[in-house]
Image (cartoon, grey):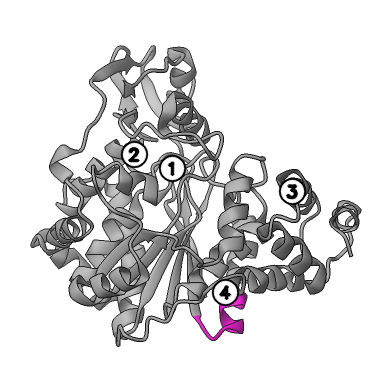
Amino acid sequence: MNIVDIINKKRLGYKLTKEEIAFAINNYIDKKIEDYQMSALLMAICLNGMDSEETFNMTDVFLHSGDILDLSEINTTKVDKHSTGGIGDKTTLVLAPLVASCGVPVAKMSGRSLGFTGGTIDKLEAIPNLRTDLTLEEFINQVKEIGVAVVSQTGNLVPADKKIYALRDVTGTVQSLPLIASSIMSKKLASGVDKIVIDLKIGDGAFVKTVEEAKILGNIMVEIGKNYNKEVICVVTSMDQPLGKAIGNSLEVIEAMDTLKCEGPKDLEEVVLTLGSYMVSMGKNISYQDAQKELMENLKNGKAYSKFEEMVKMQKGNIEALEISSKVYSLKSKTTGFIKEIKAQKLGELVRSIGGGRYTKEDVVDFKVGMVLNKKVNDYVLEDEELVKVYLGDKDININEILDCFVIDMEQKEDNQLIYGVIK
C-alpha cells in the first residue's frame, strides 16, 4: 500500500477502504507522507466525495488518532455546541457562559480560523493575556468550579484532524461535506461530552451553501452520533449575511459582550437562544420552552454576563485591555433604497485581507481590525448614510470592493429567514 495509489484511486472516483484511509492519515501524522501528498488526497476527496461508510471510517480514524477525554469527574450531563462557521459567527462567546449560567456545564474545545471565517479561539485570544492552552486538569477543574471553559484543542486530542484542519485552511479543501462531518464529529466525540448541538450554517457566508447540502451534512452527523450512542441535534441557520454586525476578532468580542447584556443585534440573540434552548433542554431534561425562558431571564438579570466575566478571569484574560484599531473609516451609501443583499463571504475575505484571518498556517492575526455594519438586509438606507465602519491596521483596502458587497434595491427582500429547521 502506498499514498500515490490511494490518491489515484480517489482521483478516479473509487471508494477507499478503512485500511487505506488509516494508512494515509496515520502516516501523515508520523511525517512519512508530505503536505503536498495529503493536499492531493484532500483535493481528490473534495472533487469526488465520500460515501457514508468512508465518512464513518474517516471519523473513526481521526477519533482514535489520539486521546479521548474522560470528563466523568463532571458528574452532570455535559452538552457541547459546534458551528460549521460563518462570517461574524461569535455565538460561542455568548452561548457558553449563558448556558453555564443555567446550570448546564459547557466544556468546550474550539478551533482557529478556517477558510474565510474567524475562529472562536482567535476571538478569545483578542482578549489580552487570556489563556486558551489550559492543561486537561485545569480544563476539567475550571468546568467543575464555574461551569464553563472554552479552550483550544489540547495536545493529543484528535491530532490527525488538528494537522489536516490547518492544511485544509490553506489548500482550498475546506468545502467538502465528508471532511467537514469527519472533522466536526471526531472532535466532538473525543471531547468527552454527552450530547451535541450543531449550528449548521448555510448561505453565501458559510461553507455549506444550500438547505439540501445542509440536510445531507446534518443527517451524516446525526448518524455518526448514533454510531457512538451520542444524541446530536443540528439546527440549520442562515449565513446569507453576516451574523450580527461585527466582523473581526476584537469587534466580535465587544458585540458578544453587548449581547450578554441584552444590547446586541437581534439576529445574533435569536440564534443564541435557539441553540441554547436545545442545549439546556438536553442538559436538564426540561422542555425547550422552559429552557428558553430560563435563558432569557439570565440575559436580563445579568447572570450570563457575570459568567462570561468569571470565565475570562479564570483564564487570566484582561477584558479592560481589549483593543480595536483607531484607524476608522465610515463608508456611506451611494444610493437610496432597501438592502437587498450583503455578500457575506466577500466581506469575510476582505477582513482576512487586512489581517483579520489567515492565508497560511504561520500568519499572525491582527485582532484589532475588522468592520461593523450599520445596515442589514431589508434595512432602508439613504444616500450618504453610513453603511459600514472599517477598522484598518497596517494594510489598506479597496473601498469600492466593500461597497460592492451591498446590493441596494427599491424593493425589500421577500425571504429573510434566519432559522431553517432542525435535524435530529
The amino acid type of the residue labelled 2 equals Asn
Instruction: Pick the residue in front: 375 or 44.
Output: 44
Disc marking residue 222: 4
Element marked by disc 2: helix
Q: Nearer the viewer, mark 1 or mark 4?
A: 1
Q: Earlier in the sequence, mark 2 or mark 4?
A: 4
Residue on which disc 3 sits: 34
Residue on which disc 1 sits: 118
Q: CA distance from mark 1 to mark 4?
A: 25 Å
Q: CA distance from mark 1 to mark 3?
A: 27 Å
Q: Residue at x 20, y 38 (%)?
A: 322
**Residue 15: x %, y % from top left:** 85, 65
Image quadrant where residue 17 sits = bottom right
**Residue 363: x %, y % from top left:** 49, 34
* Tag count: 4
**Residue 1: x %, y % from top left:** 89, 65
Q: Using a 10 Å C-alpha cutoff, classify the residue at mark 2 as few (fewer than 14 neighbours), some (14 to 19) or many (20 or more).
A: many
Instruction: Pick the residue in front: 71 or 351.
Output: 71
Q: CA distance from mark 3 to mark 2?
A: 32 Å
Q: Earlier in the sequence, mark 3 or mark 2?
A: 3
The amino acid type of the residue labelled 3 equals Glu
Disc marking residue 59: none
Q: Taking 162 as reference, is 149 left or right?
A: left
| Span shown in magenta | 222-230
Q: Using a 10 Å C-alpha cutoff, classify the residue at mark 3 as few (fewer than 14 neighbours), some (14 to 19) or many (20 or more).
A: few
Element marked by disc 1: loop
Q: Nearer the viewer, mark 4 or mark 3?
A: 3
Image quadrant where residue 393 sits = top left
Asked if marks 2 and 4 touch (Cβ < 8 Å), the reply is no
Q: Residue at x 57, y 48 (%)?
A: 166
- What is the magenta segment's predominant secondary structure? helix
